[in-house]
């Protein structure tokens, strides 16, 4: 009998959990009440086309094993590094 994992919330934790489950071959359903994914992380584009990200989450490499693996595997190391 196949089982399906239901993840409620399309924020950072929900997205990472759904990604892990799907990579493990588990049928996964992600439910989000809003029309955009990302939870507290949002982006805004200004009139010049510049995109600004804002939110209460901080993602950075080497913060934890989970975020480090996320940067390596999901983003395939295609991101910009900078010091705060």
Image (cartoon, rainbow, N blue to C red):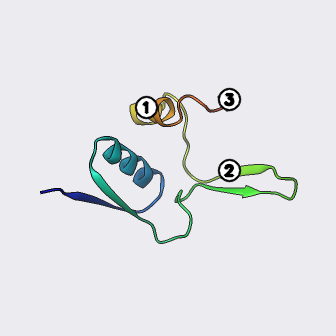
- Residue drawn where x is 60% and y is 31% of the image: 78
Q: Report x, y in % for residue 26.
A: 26, 49
Q: Which residue is mark 1?
A: 69
Mark number, residue 22: none
User: What is the distance, in whole Å, between disc 2 and disc 3 at their CAs?
Assistant: 15 Å
**Residue closest to the far left:** 1
Which residue is located at x 55 percent, y 69 percent? Answer: 35
Provide residue 39's location: percent of width, then percent of height. Answer: 52, 59
User: How many neighbours does mark 2 have within 10 angstroms: few (below 14), some (14-19), or many (20 or more)?
Assistant: few
Determine which residue is flagged by label 3.
Answer: 82
What is the quadrant of residue 6 in the picture? bottom left
How packed mark 3 is, by other alpha carbons closer than 10 Å (few <14, some 14-19, many 20 or more), is: few
Judged left or right of residue 54, residue 19 is left
**For residue 67, above or below residue 12:** above
Disc 2: which residue: 53
Q: Residue furthest right?
A: 48
């Amino acid at each position: 009998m196949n089982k399906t994992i239901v993840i409620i919330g399309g924020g950072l934790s929900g997205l990472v959990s759904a990604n892990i489950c799907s990579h493990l071959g588990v049928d996964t359903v992600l439910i989000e009440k809003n029309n955009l994914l990302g939870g507290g992380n949002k982006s805004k584009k200004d009139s010049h086309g510049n995109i600004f990200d804002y939110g209460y989450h901080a993602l950075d490499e080497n913060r934890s094993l989970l975020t480090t693996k996320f940067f390596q595997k999901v983003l395939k190391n295609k991101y910009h590094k900078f010091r705060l």
